[in-house]
Amino acid sequence: MKKFLLPLLFLFLLIFESIFVQYLPDGILGKDRILVPHFLFVALLFLTIFVGKKKGVIYAAIFGLLFDVVYVEIIGIYLFLYPFISYLVSKIMHIMQANFIIAFLVSLFAVALLEVGVYEMDYLIHVTNLDFMSFLTLRFYPTLILNAAFIILAGYPLKRFFEKHLESLRDE
């Protein structure tokens, strides 16, 4: 049963992101602001930080593909960016100490990298015609604020969950 907890957590977060967007009040950070929850991605980053690179990148690839299939009409953007950024985070964490504050900062940096990467890919293939400065004010900053609030609220429970998961893996 314990081996199903991790995929179920990620599946719950995948579904929760869309439910969260539906029930989020319009104009919460101002008119025309776009808030994009990356709760699944943050959890994948915490898995990479507190459990390990291999497991983090594998889950990131699987759920990146699943995210593309469910939410995006172009398969490959999240399939590429989730594992790539998870790998970068694992390399950054080789230098840094794995505590909550560092995990918060690195995760926020990774969400920013994901947002810019998705914007650039969408701009490159003409899915969006939003210029970069408008993107920053309308989507980037509100998304960072939302995901920072999520990391503050859910980060410590995620950290504890993944540390316990790592301990159970070592006991097996």
Image (cartoon, helix red, strand yellow):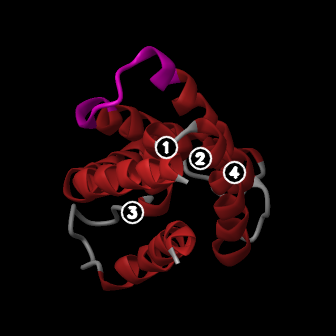
Was residue 162 drawn as part of the magenta stretch in this picture? no
Q: Calculate the distance from the C-alpha at mark 3 to the C-alpha at mark 4.
A: 29 Å
Horizontal placement of 69 versus 18: left or right? right
What mark, if any, has residue 58 been given in the picture? 4
* N-terminal-most mark, 2 or 1: 1
Q: Calculate the distance from the C-alpha at mark 3 to the C-alpha at mark 2.
A: 28 Å
Q: Are marks 3 and 1 in contact (CB under 8 Å)?
A: no
Q: Are marks 3 and 4 in contact (CB under 8 Å)?
A: no
Q: Calculate the distance from the C-alpha at mark 3 to the C-alpha at mark 1.
A: 32 Å
Q: Amino acid at mark 4?
A: Ile
Q: Are marks 2 and 1 in contact (CB under 8 Å)?
A: yes
- Depth check, front residue: 99 or 138: 99
Magenta segment's dominant SS is helix
Q: Which residue is mark 3?
A: 34
Task: Single out the mark in the foreground, 3 or 2.
Answer: 2
Residues packed near mark 4 inside 10 Å, few (<14), some (14 to 19) or many (20 plus): some
Please give the name of the residue rendered at 64% of the width and 63% of the height, measured from the top-left corner: 63
Q: Which residue is mark 1?
A: 51
Residues packed near mark 2 inside 10 Å, few (<14), some (14 to 19) or many (20 plus): many
Q: Calculate the distance from the C-alpha at mark 4 to the C-alpha at mark 1.
A: 12 Å
Element marked by disc 4: helix
Horizontal placement of 144 versus 12: left or right? left
Element marked by disc 1: loop
Residue 92 percent across, percent down from the top left: 50, 22
Residue 112 percent across, percent down from the top left: 45, 40
Q: Amino acid at mark 3?
A: Ile
Q: Quadrant of the C terminus?
A: bottom right
Q: Amino acid at mark 2?
A: Gly
- Depth check, front residue: 171 or 144: 171
* N-terminal-most mark, 3 or 2: 3
What mark, if any, has residue 56 been given in the picture? 2
Q: Amino acid at mark 1?
A: Val
